[in-house]
Image (cartoon, rainbow, N blue to C red):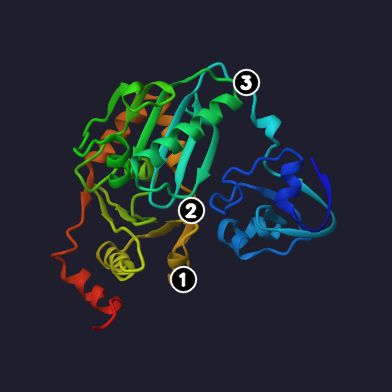
Amino acid sequence: MKIKLNGQNASLRGLMEREGFRFPCGGKGLCGRCKVVAKELPPTERDHRFLTAEELQAGVRLACDKTIDGEIELEPLFGREENRAERMDYSDAYAVFTDYATFAGLAADGEVADSVLLPPTEISHFALRGAAQKEIVELIERHSVAKAGTMLIAAEPLRFHALTGIAEAIPEGDTVDAALFNMPADEVYLPPIKGELLGGNIPLEALGREQGEMLVAGGTVLYVGEASIHTAFIYRTKESLGVFKATVEYFLERFMPVKRSYIAPDPVMEERGGFHPVQSLIPVNAAQALGSNRVKAKLRKLSAKLETEDLVNSDCFHKYLSTFLPAE
């Protein structure tokens, strides 16, 4: 259904929000879901980052970064607020914290019912707990759900420890009373965690990836092999950028992946080239895990296959590290 909008040097996002359209990530350019068909709008860098060549050719654009001057007719490919806020008798929920994004949403029957995508949450107990509570409460209130049944919580290691106080591994995963973490649900499901260096977010991101695929997701680099999933995690800062780049090159040389992907947006990977942007699988996999014991079993098997690469003792890694680190 097409709509007409009119504005003078006006934000398209602002005009659409006044018409009741809800931008999943708040218009921050994190998710690529606010698609509209508007051929007269020239594609931007953000469009090229998230949209396929076929979509661009068909006139699909993202509404979050556009400015219009005059009248425009377009076809939204995402829904108004009132269409997304139907009453739900029951739902589960998830909150997953990574170093590249915060994922929160409601799930019903193994599918994402409503979701938000936010920038990474600060590594502190109160910030993480507050974000999980706030986002889930807002979602369940919008859908008139009294309280979520099961709430999945996962995070990379530092954020997981800050939020829960749990430092040890949880090989099989665990389900506990939600009151333990003061969450708006009956119980909390913690996906499996292998060791101190791998968070429960990694199986959620890896599930469904192709064999032979190398994926870069924030500071996580992983390769899906036949028997193992090889991983490394680098906290990406200005100082650690050379270490991160050397890790990427190490994975490329060691595993020679047939598919190379990264979670968009990522300026470092865009600049490097040779990788194509993909959307995170965390929301879909979290929703499926909440609705299926079979998916939980898949996460356990996947977690058991995770292997952390020993970069410190690798000559290949140090070869690349000497290339990317500045000379003293």
Mark 3 lies on residue:
87
* 166 horizontally vs 147: left or right: left
Q: Name the spot of residue 154 as percent of width and height, x first.
A: 35, 37
The residue depicted at 49 percent of the width and 31 percent of the height is: 136
Q: Name the mark nearer the viewer: 3 or 1.
A: 3
Q: Secondary structure at mark 1?
A: helix
Q: Position of residue 192 (x, y in %)?
A: 27, 35
Residue at the farthest front position: 126
User: Disc 3 and disc 1: Cα gap in Å?
Assistant: 44 Å
> Looking at the image, is 150 positioned above or below residue 97?
above
Residue 255 placement, left or right of 53: left
Residue for badge 2: 278
According to the picture, the residue beneath numbered tag 1 turns out to be: 271
* Amino acid residing under circle 3: Arg
Q: Nearer the viewer, mark 3 or mark 2?
A: 3
Q: Residues within 10 Å of mark 1 (few under 14, many from 20)?
A: few
Q: Quadrant of residue 130 in the image?
A: top left
Q: Is residue 86 above or below residue 27?
A: above
